[in-house]
């Protein structure tokens, strides 16, 4: 039995371990193992290369899960230990990591963040990201534009209508449409005051989650609660500090996530800011304090 210590744990991961009675393995990859419980909630066990996430348990060993686990490996939870196949993971000394960025500070700096993103867009003379989503006939640009406009203007009904058409569209464990929605929700938390952002994000998450995969639903529900992964936290910190080099570096790292997941999420995030910029330029955008 391999004895493994955990470094950090998200609150959702703590709750998962405390309240799961029928866990099973959902996916096994080299550096990630996803578990799912009887309430279709997901726990991701990851190594330090992946790092903190809204439902992550980060271990200190650079272990390859694919060499130790399969879909039928036994799972047993007892007090501060998770027994997974031939591994015993101790969670007692794990640091509690908060997945919720400082949305108040980000909202206060929303105009500066918008200026930075639009400057980078102009400086590069091309889109900051290149996502297959934008040219995918399954996800037509008018639908993406409708979603971004509806979120920007806080038109919940229109946003949910577009969400129903986007949710679950695309291939993979987190379809492109879901990734775009997640990025747009994260931008909404910055653009709008907390009360409005919460209503929009929760509504989108609750509408999209039943229409997609278990893993993608977990990410959507996290964004609906105002939670994000460590790479997004680093991007937000760079934006608040107005560090253009760091911002571009963070964008590059997010682009490396998945096959197109990072690019599709960034397309939603930046797309919402472009929508706000367009409305602001036409003096039709709602002004918030």
Image: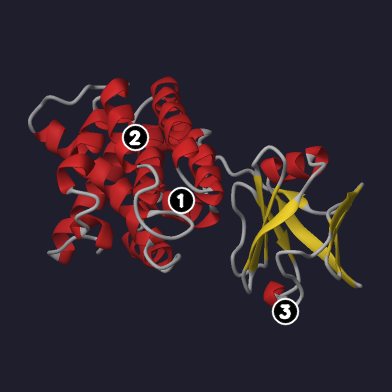
Residue under the point 10% across and 35% down: 281
| Residue contact between numbered discs 2 and 3, judged by CB atoms under 8 Å | no
Q: Is residue 102 left or right of residue 112?
A: right
Q: Nearer the viewer, residue 141 or 270?
A: 141
Q: Which comes sooner in the sequence, label 2 or label 3?
A: 3
Camera sees residue 95? yes
Q: Is residue 118 left or right of residue 166?
A: left
Q: Which mark is residue 164?
A: 2
Kindly report which numbered mark, 2 or 1, lies closer to the viewer in this rendering. 2
Camera sees residue 129? no
How far is the residue under mark 2 from the one under mark 1? 32 Å
Kindly report which numbered mark, 1 or 3, lies closer to the viewer in this rendering. 3
x and y percentages locating residue 71 in the rendered image: 70, 64
Residue under the point 43% across and 26% down: 203
Q: Which comes sooner in the sequence, label 1 or label 3?
A: 3
| Residue tagged 1 | 237
| SS label for mark 3 | helix
Residue under the point 63% across and 74% down: 30
Relative to 139, is 280 above or below?
A: above
């Amino acid at each position: 039995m391999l004895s493994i210590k955990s470094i950090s744990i998200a609150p959702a991961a703590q709750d998962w371990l405390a309240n799961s009675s029928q866990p099973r393995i959902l996916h096994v990859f080299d550096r990630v193992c996803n578990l799912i419980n009887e309430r279709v909630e997901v726990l991701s066990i990851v190594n330090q290369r992946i790092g903190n996430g809204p439902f992550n348990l980060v271990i200190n060993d650079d272990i390859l899960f694919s060499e130790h686990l399969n879909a039928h490996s036994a799972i047993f939870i007892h007090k501060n230990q998770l027994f997974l196949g031939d591994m015993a993971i101790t969670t007692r000394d794990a640091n509690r990591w908060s997945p919720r960025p400082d949305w108040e500070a980000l909202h206060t700096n929303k105009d500066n963040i918008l200026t930075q993103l639009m400057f980078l867009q102009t400086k590069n003379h091309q889109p900051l990201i290149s996502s297959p989503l934008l040219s995918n006939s399954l996800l037509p640009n008018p639908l993406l534009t409708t979603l971004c406009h509806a979120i920007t203007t806080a038109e919940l009904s229109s946003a949910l209508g577009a969400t129903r058409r986007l949710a679950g569209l695309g291939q993979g464990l987190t379809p492109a449409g879901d990734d775009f929605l997640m990025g747009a929700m994260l931008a909404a938390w910055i653009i709008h005051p907390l009360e409005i952002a919460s209503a929009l994000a929760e509504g989108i998450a609750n509408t999209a989650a039943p229409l997609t995969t278990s893993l993608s639903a977990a990410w959507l529900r996290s964004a609906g609660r105002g939670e994000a992964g460590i790479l997004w936290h680093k991007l937000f910190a760079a934006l608040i500090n107005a560090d253009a080099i760091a911002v571009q570096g963070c964008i590059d790292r997010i682009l490396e996530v998945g096959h197109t997941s990072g690019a599709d999420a960034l397309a939603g995030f930046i797309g919402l800011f472009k929508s706000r910029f367009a409305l602001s330029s036409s003096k039709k955008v709602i002004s918030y304090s």
